[in-house]
Amino acid sequence: MSIVNISYNSYDLQTTTNTSSIIMSRDIVYRSLPQKNIILKQDTIRDSFDVVSVNYSQKIITVRGLLKSDSEANLRTLRDAFMSALNPNEKNLDIDYGSGTIRYKASVESINVPEEFFHITTLPFEISFLCEPFGKATSTTSVNLNSGNAISASPYNESPSITGTYKAKPTITITINSETDMTVLKWDNTTIGDWIQISTAFSASDVLVINCEDETVQLNGADTDFTGVFPNFSNGVNSLILTVTATAFNLSASFSYYPTYL
């Protein structure tokens, strides 16, 4: 098995360059499904049940390995630095995913270092990370609607494909190039039934940013009112409809997202 790069809060948990402070993370267990909470409605007549709702709550990632050094004193120094580096909470746990890096927001739940009398320059360890249920790519994927060309007809339909294995929360950016009596803009993802609508007197050069991760809607950098919900993307193909109420308009639209993984 090849070495898997892993770090917590930028602290390298896979390093062999310095013989006095070697950390070898051997078993990294992270590919299991997150904890899944299923709410049921019992049907006593049919001796069955219906699933009311489902959500994912958390994920446990374990890492086992060795701390190695060239002397007993240096092993103690390495162990202390190791414990100190893993102390902060809600930091990035980055794991090499083969074709890239997958990032979890994590806190260290426990660190087990089972010591024996013969552990003079080597110590085994096991770390348990309590993580948010999903990992994300470390960089965003960007999509320009209409291949980056301006949109001037309503409704406008497009079906982009979203990478990852679970729903993603996009940041949507819409720039109004020109307009006549433009008062309503609606973004609708009919694949999952999420839509958001902004009603205001738009002007040329306006920039509307809908951040579904932070749940903010800003027009030219200032918060603005909206109706609906912050639209997510499901993984795979999504059917988008952009609807504009105006006598005439010309706009550019794009979105970016972090691919999300179960």
Image (spheres, grey):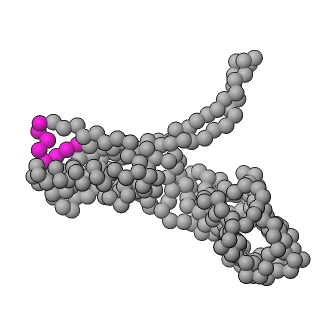
Q: What is the magenta range? A: 117-124
Does residue 118 show up magenta in the picture?
yes
- From the top left corner, tell me how far across and down residue 128 is, in percent: 37, 42
What residue lies at 57% left-to-right and 66% top-to-bottom? Answer: 141
Q: Is residue 56 above or below residue 148?
A: above
Q: Quadrant of residue 233?
A: bottom right
What residue lies at 17% left-to-right and 53% top-to-bottom? Answer: 77
Observer-nearest residue: 199 or 258? 199
- From the top left corner, tell me how far across and down residue 146 is, in percent: 72, 73
Residue furthest right in the image: 247
28 vs 254, left or right, is left
Q: Is residue 248 above or below residue 6?
A: below
117 vs 158, left or right, is left
5 vs 147, left or right, is left
What residue lies at 71% left-to-right and 72% top-to-bottom? Answer: 219
- From the top left corner, tell me how far across and down residue 204 is, in percent: 77, 82
Q: Is residue 58 visible?
A: yes
Q: Main secondary structure of the magenta part?
A: loop
Q: Quadrant of residue 241?
A: bottom right
Q: Is residue 187 visible?
A: no
Q: Quadrant of residue 27?
A: top left
What residue lies at 66% left-to-right and 55% top-to-bottom? Answer: 232
Q: Is residue 253 above or below residue 186?
A: below
Observer-nearest residue: 1 or 164? 164
84 vs 229, left or right, is left
Does residue 119 show up magenta in the picture?
yes
- From the top left corner, tell me how far across and down residue 125 is, in percent: 26, 43
Marker count (numbered): 0
